[in-house]
Image (spheres, rainbow, N blue to C red):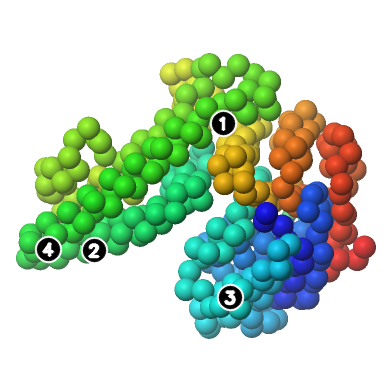
């Protein structure tokens, strides 16, 4: 079980020192605009993944009057995770008292999903966010994936460097082509297998949560190259184009998910609220799959749920999350709006956030 039993945040945005003991079910963080609610979710996300969901750089997260941001969590099984980030130093991550070189162990221990007002960007934005979405799921269910993913990333980076060099070192290029092909095949296989399990589960959940017919909705996984052909041949054939762009045009780094409704792109048809529901359902389906495949419960961070969603949709999201039995953190300005969207009587704790501290 991934449950945060104690959370301490120091010098993150407007939070100076904050301690919370969340409950394993629904935790509601309420307070005025700018009080620090999203910053608490951001701290949890940062600890769980090494990334913020609001900014690519971590510097803006550090409180402007202080030098080092610290986030600490104790999980219900006693395991502890600690992260510190100073302005001039790299991030330091500790898990069970041991220094971690990367987020692999912690991310596995603390699977975490964010549903927020930017959720529709998964459909509207570039393919990178959709690859990240897919890879989040693959990473959790297939242990060897991360190694192959790193190998393919390294091969592409080295290949791209070589493509820009003159004279061209064809021998080295061929060596990186072979390395890339080995890793790329494995990355694709794992993504394809995951997607095969994910898609029917998602469609069923979409039907249940949205109460609509999904016959016209079509989601496809695209591998990033023509997998019916040998990638090595494709790389050789496209070498001149790759040299012109100074970048590899075919490979797993070009994978994507496409969303269509009938003949149109889903983003051109769905309203903003419908896009948000589609993406929220996708993320919830990943949590469900994780729980079915590994018996692990994902922590859901739900920021500012009401924006652009009507009551029925808010109820659909919260009821589904509650029924899955994992830990949930929900932010809102007015607590009434969330209480009104929680059907049944789930066990909940409320925290009033005021100027970066909890006051009740
Ligand atoms: N590096 C920083 N140092 C100090 N304060 C910061 C820093 N970055 C952001 N802030 C401030 O932290 C406060 C908390 O922001 P946060 O987004 O968490 O608020 P919120 O409670 O989610 O508000 P809203 O209801 O508007 O979404 C804001 O007032 C913001 O201006
Ligand atoms: Mg906020």
For marks 2 and 3, the one nearer the N-term is 3
Mark drawn on residue 147: none
Q: Which residue is mark 1?
A: 202
For marks 4 and 1, the one nearer the N-term is 4
Q: Which residue is mark 3?
A: 94
- For residue 269, above or below residue 9: above
Q: Which residue is mark 4?
A: 172
- For residue 52, above or below residue 283: below
Q: Position of residue 242 (x, y in %)?
A: 18, 50
Element marked by disc 2:
helix
Image side of residue 348 versus residue 202, left or right: right
For marks 1 and 2, the one nearer the N-term is 2
For marks 1 and 3, the one nearer the N-term is 3
**Foreground pick, 198 / 55:** 198
Tell us which disc is closer to us: 2 or 3: 3
Residue reaching furthest to the right: 360
């Amino acid at each position: 079980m991934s449950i945060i039993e104690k959370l301490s945040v120091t010098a993150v945005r407007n939070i100076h020192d904050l301690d919370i003991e969340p409950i394993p079910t629904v935790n509601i963080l309420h307070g005025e605009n700018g009080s620090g609610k999203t910053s608490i979710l951001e701290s949890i996300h940062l600890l769980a993944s090494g990334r913020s969901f609001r900014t690519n750089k971590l510097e803006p997260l550090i409180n402007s009057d202080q030098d080092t941001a610290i986030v600490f969590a104790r999980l219900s099984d006693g395991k502890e995770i600690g992260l510190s980030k100073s302005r001039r130093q790299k991030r330091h991550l500790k898990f069970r008292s041991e220094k971690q070189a990367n987020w692999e162990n912690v991310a596995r221990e603390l699977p975490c999903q964010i549903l927020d007002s930017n959720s529709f960007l998964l459909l509207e934005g570039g393919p990178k966010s959709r690859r990240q979405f897919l890879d989040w799921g693959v990473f959790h269910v297939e242990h060897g994936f991360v190694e192959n993913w790193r190998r393919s990333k390294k091969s592409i980076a080295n290949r791209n460097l070589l493509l820009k060099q003159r004279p061209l070192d064809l021998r080295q290029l061929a060596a990186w082509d072979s390395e890339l092909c080995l890793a790329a095949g494995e990355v694709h296989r794992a993504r394809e297998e995951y997607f095969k399990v994910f898609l029917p589960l998602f469609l069923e959940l979409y039907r249940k949560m949205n109460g609509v017919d999904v016959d016209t909705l079509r989601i496809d996984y695209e591998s990033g190259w023509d997998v019916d052909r040998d990638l090595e041949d494709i790389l050789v054939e496209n070498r001149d184009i790759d040299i012109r762009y100074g970048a590899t045009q075919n490979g797993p780094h070009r994978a994507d998910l496409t969303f269509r409704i009938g003949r149109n792109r889903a983003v051109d048809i769905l309203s903003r609220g419908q896009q948000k529901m589609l993406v929220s359902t996708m993320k919830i389906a990943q949590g469900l799959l994780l729980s079915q495949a590994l018996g692990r419960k994902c922590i859901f961070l739900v920021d500012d749920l009401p924006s652009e969603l009507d009551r029925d949709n808010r109820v659909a999201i919260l009821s589904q999350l509650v029924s899955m039995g994992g830990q949930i953190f929900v932010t809102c300005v007015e607590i009434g709006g969330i209480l009104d969207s929680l059907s049944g009587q789930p066990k909940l704790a409320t925290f009033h956030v005021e100027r970066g501290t909890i006051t009740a």
